[in-house]
Image (cartoon, rainbow, N blue to C red):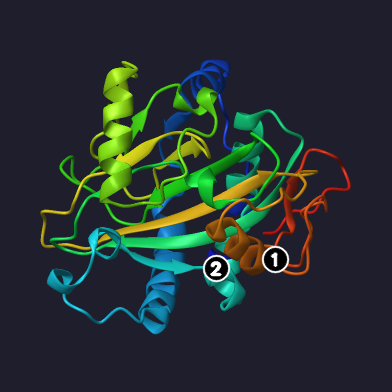
Amino acid sequence: MSGNVQIDAELSRSYPLRDEQIASYREDGHLLLKEVASPAVLGQYRPLILEEVNLMNKEKRPLSERDTYGKAFLQISNLWERNEAVQRFVFARRFARIAAELMGVSGVRMYHDQALFKEPGGGHTPWHQDQIYWPVDTEHTITLWMPLVDVPAEVGSMTFASGSQKRGYISKLAISDQSHKTLAQYIEAEKIPTFHYGAMSAGDATFHAGWTLHSAPGNPTDRMREVMTIIYVADGTKVLEPDTNARKNDLARWMPGLQPGDPINSPLNPLVYSAEPEGFSFG
């Protein structure tokens, strides 16, 4: 079997989840899984992701001239639209099946991908909920967050507020100094436990629900924190009436042509895993 064929086969191969891992995810709203992608897979796809990030990155200002959001990371979205090879990684059945099984749904569609690269000296990512940006009428959303390089404990995983996903829409505050202060106070007042997984190896991945409160530390090292994320939404989900400009923008960008009440099935939202025999899978 040639190298590329072997790697594609790995991206189609199921990742065995234990019942206690699924239960932990549903209770806490987050989970770390080890070796979701092998060194061979990352050896194939990391250079392609880096190339796209370098081509698409328009941020040239020094960190000192950016606001808190701008210092948090370089953010490049939907690499899969621009690079067919990267698409094979983003659409991997292996990743999408994990997402579906953790949520307990029969299939998942693509919402979008993001490369989130935290530069050396980059700032913290404030507390926030991802789903305040997403006009999707479901609780079943999930993000895969995978470092492409080893990250030490001081950079490490995100910090999660365990069980916060059960509270739904907590605040409309976008990622900012204000969201960090307000939500940190909320977590403390409500006595919500927080947890982080520390150092992560390249190819490990955390999964977290769209409503799970989370933050991330800055990067005090001299090495870029390279992370690839993939956001999934349960198949059959409908578009929610946008109640903020952020959600209006997301509807136009990530679900083009769709209206509130429509099933999420635009050309940018392909079905990437289904437990049904006729379900599409890429890779």
Determine whether 101 is above or below 262 in the image.
above
Residue 169, x across and y down, in percent: 53, 34
* Residues at marks 2 and 1, CA–CA distance in whole angstroms: 9 Å
Q: Are marks 2 and 1 in contact (CB under 8 Å)?
A: yes
What residue is shown at x 28% (from left), y 65% (from top)? Answer: 70
The reply to whether residue 8 is in sight is: no
What residue is shown at x 74% (from left), y 59% (from top)? Answer: 270
Q: Along the horizontal axis of the image, is 282 left or right of 98?
A: right
Q: Can you tell which quarter of the image residue 67 is in?
A: bottom left
Quarter that holds the N terminus: bottom right
Determine whether 136 is above or below 55 in the image.
above
Classify mark 2: helix, strand or loop: loop
Which residue in the protein does label 1 denote? Answer: 268
Q: Amino acid at mark 1?
A: Leu
Determine whether 30 is above or below 204 in the image.
above
Quarter that holds the C terminus: bottom right
- In the picture, the disc for residue 78 is 2
Determine whether 109 is above or below 76 in the image.
above
Q: Amino acid at mark 2?
A: Asn
Residue closest to the eye, 137 or 245:
245
Residue 39, x across and y down, in percent: 39, 54
Which badge, 2 or 1, is on the more N-terminal residue? 2
Residue 65, x across and y down, in percent: 16, 73
